[in-house]
Amino acid sequence: MKKIVNIIIFGLLLLIFGSYMFTFQVRQDEIAFVNHLGKNSEPIIESGLKPKWPWPIQRVYKFDKRIHVKTTRYDQVMTQNGKSVMMQFYFGWKIENPSAFMSNTSGSDSAARMKDAEKQLLVIVDAEKNNQVNMVATSFGSFIQGEGVEGESRVDFDKLEKAILDKANSKAEANLGVEIKFVGIRKVGVPQGSLDVVLEAMVTQWTSKSETEIHIGQQEADAIRAKARNDKETALQKARAEAKTTLAAAQADALQQFKLMEQDPQLAAFLMQLEALEKSVKKQTTLILDDSMGPFGLLRGLESPLKKDQSKQ
Amino acid sequence: MVTDKIDRRGGLWNLLITLLGVGGSVALAVATSSVTTYVIAAFMVLGLVVAVASLLHMQLREREQMEARELEEIQQGATAEALFEEGQVLPAKRSREQFEKWGMPSVAIVMLGLQVYGIYYIYTKRLSPAFETIDSWIIIDPSKALFGAALMGLIFFLRGQFASNLARIEKQRFLQPASDYILFGAYLNFILAAVVAVSYKDGSVDVYVATGLIILLGVAAVENLLGMIFEIYRPRVSGRQSRLLYQSRLIGLVAKPENLFTTAGQILDYQFGFKVSETWGYQFLRERLGVIIGLQIIILWLSTTIVVIEPSVRGRLVDGAREGQQATLLEPGIHLKLPWPFASVERFYPDQVHTFHVGLEPLAEEEIPPQFLDRPGLWLEPNGKDYESKKKTGELFFLIGSGDQKVEANLMVASVPVQYRIRSVGDGELKGLEDGWLRFSDPEQLLKNIATREVVNYFLNHDFEELLIKGRKTAQETLVKNIQDQVNDRNLGVEILFVGVASLRPPAESPQNVIERADAANPGQEQPELNSMPVAAAFEGPVSAGLMSRMNKFSAEQESLRLSAERTNEVGIIQYNAKVTSDLLRMEAKSRFQRQAGSQEPFKQASNVYPLWLYLTTFERAVENTRKFVVAAPNHELEVDLDLHEAIRRGMTDIKVPTPKKK
């Protein structure tokens, strides 16, 4: 029993290691090459389990034929007027011509060859990126849509990406058997050495903005106050003038009445005196009268002094 | 005299095999850059030293035994009196003794030196760099490593098993150490083969296993050192076998784990007071342990045929042995597949919402420094993943418009979360997991790049005021649309759910401290005069200034309202007074006139009585409420004192005071 189990275990191990040594798998998203004593086979595109001789007689290179994405370094690119801008790109690439890819890349295994291909692609894309950015940009400000940048002079992402793609792709196809499917701008920034200058400008911009804001606010407040005072003064003056006019009109109206009263001035004066008397003698007034005043003449007898007064009148 | 059985040929074989092991493992280490292989090479070098030392020891011992036999024969045929003392006629014995006295400690010291240097070299030159790049760690040319490890393991196992058993059965103590090392080397190579196999899936296993083996090498070094120290204090008895300093008990234990059972059995026997080691269960476990472990390995391997896909997860089964279409999408549930490595399953989470950040990634809750916990997040106290390194490279800052013609650009720090979902299946022109996401070797990286591009492009077209104040909602909607359009153009099979622009802020750095100046350490050099105010603080200036302005305007408006109300009131009063005065004037004039007109006729008709009547009635009315003093004494001079003070209001004296009631 122990021997059988040992044999089974040994057999299984042999199966696993044997299958590794004498077979290889080509998956549906892979391309394979079999190197027989230094000579490469035609590319194996059909997927499935394939036989092979163990290393060192045969060795298998397998490459992923899906689209690979590579991101460039975030580095400094020179613009046409000598200023620089920080830029990072990404691109997608795919093995288009497996034989050309195999013959134009180097490395001890598949991963090393893929790395080598990426390294070569980076060189191509970096070169084209530098050329194209240099042609269209003057500084990092060229990428900004602002008041200082005219719409047409601003760098268009799509056009720049397409220009780089066109140039880089032709070289990649010819040199490596690889198709660059797309190129994208990942990031645009300010070179590290210019960060302080940009931040200084920002601080100055916002400090002066705050000062302007306070100044404008103060002016507006002053204007509101001055307007309110003026409005009040004007309205009062106007009201006073109108009041004078109203009074003048009333006096004019009263004048007509007085003119009519002027026709009998004696009666008018008598009535006004009577009214004045009534109004002027009010409560808590102390009068010291003698018997010649008012009806008090009666105190001297029945002959009223009024009769004398009336005869005088 | 005790006789040792010597097998010089076996020792030579051990030497050749360990030499092969050193060559093979060094070649593999150089070719594959596997850290585990480097540690194995270090063990193999130690094995070679042990093999050389044991072979030398065997030779000396064999010569000594031959010499002893010769001496015995001479003594049998000679007279009772020896010509020479024994010590003078046994040079081989003296050589062996000298070797054990000086040679063995020297070998142990050399081994210790090799162990220490091996640990130092592998830790500093191989293991530390490997840990730094553990996420992308790979074994170069793994098929070569697998083949080499399996081959060496097999050769070592055959020789090690044979030699070790032979040494144990025949009690060849000089053969044992190198045989143990060879058997141990076989196990190490099997481990390496397993590591290489797993490294196809995850390369970091190489680094972890190497760490474990480095620790084992360290333990062996400590054992070696302790062995040497104990040897100094060990009493030396003439004729007693010396301890082999180059023999490692640790290696022997690992190479022959059944020795563990012997030790464990002795301990159990002692503890329980009866022969536990002779029971059926103990014997079964001892004899069949290997089989049980083997069966478990097979069960483990067979278990790779079962795949469990959990809810909200999709599996992509790739059957590498099948021709043509190899991939099948697995729905949640239990599935069967070919065992590893013939078929593999990748898991995806298409129905789940995934999130990544463009720009500064916020710290996870457990990563937030204690001083920032339970505190509001302030612009002037920034934090985030790799904040300092991103600041140094400038990657922290996003370029945006300034909104001011005189300023070329502004910088902003942003952390923009993007949430997305992978479509499990395509919908019309929109691709899904199989025909979209899986077309790319690293689709998540592509999605991150696309999102970053769109965010950067959007920021370049807008300024702070638009991004932070006016256009947040528009920004979110536009970014979702732009990213979705780009993703659809690339047929990525992803649905963008949300883009957040909440965490945008001006830099917390000042112009003075944003760059670490190299000349800061050089006090003689002139520094540029730059503002020390953080940009975030300067950004808050217009905000507070605006607030102050608004307060000022508000105060002015309040004053204006007050003045306006005063104006209205005062104007009203003036107008009212004018109107009333005018009306009164008119009315008075009119009433006078009317009275005069009414009195005119009676005045004419009764010119005496009517004025008198009018006078008296008016007089009566006028003086009704006055205090009157009438002086009616004619032609007399009167002197009257009048007190005109009004002490009390008139009329008050008329108040009746009630009389108190009688009880």
Image (cartoon, rainbow, N blue to C red):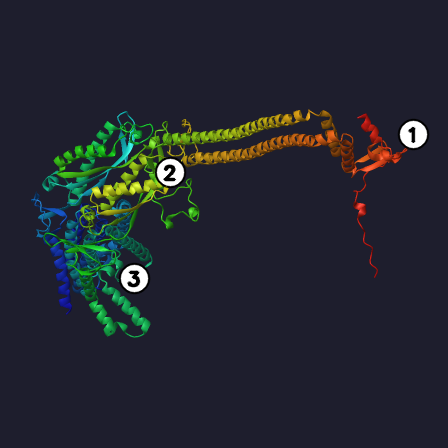
- Secondary structure beneath disc 1? loop
Q: Position of residue A297 (x, y in %)?
A: 86, 33
The disc placed on residue A44 is: none
The local crowd at label 2, few if under 14, some if 14 to 19, many if 20 or more residues have their Cα within 10 Å, is few
- Nearer mark to the viewer, of 2 and 1: 1
The disc placed on residue B635 is: 1
Quadrant of the rendering where the N terminus of chain A is positioned:
bottom left
- Secondary structure beneath disc 2? helix
Residue at 31%, 28% in the rendered image: A149
Q: Where A103 sits versus B60, above or below? A: above
Whichever of labels 2 and 3 marks the residue nearer the N terminus, that label is 3
Residues at discs 1 and 3 both on one chain: yes
Q: Position of residue B330 (x, y in %)?
A: 19, 57
Spatial distance from mark 1 to mark 3, Cα to Cα? 178 Å
Q: Where B10 sits versus B506, above or below? A: below
Q: Position of residue A30 (x, y in %)?
A: 14, 47
Q: Amino acid at mark 2?
A: Lys
Q: Amino acid at mark 1?
A: Asn
Say which residue label 2 marks. Answer: B470
Q: Can residue B521 be seen by looking at this rendering?
A: no
Residues at discs 2 and 3 both on one chain: yes
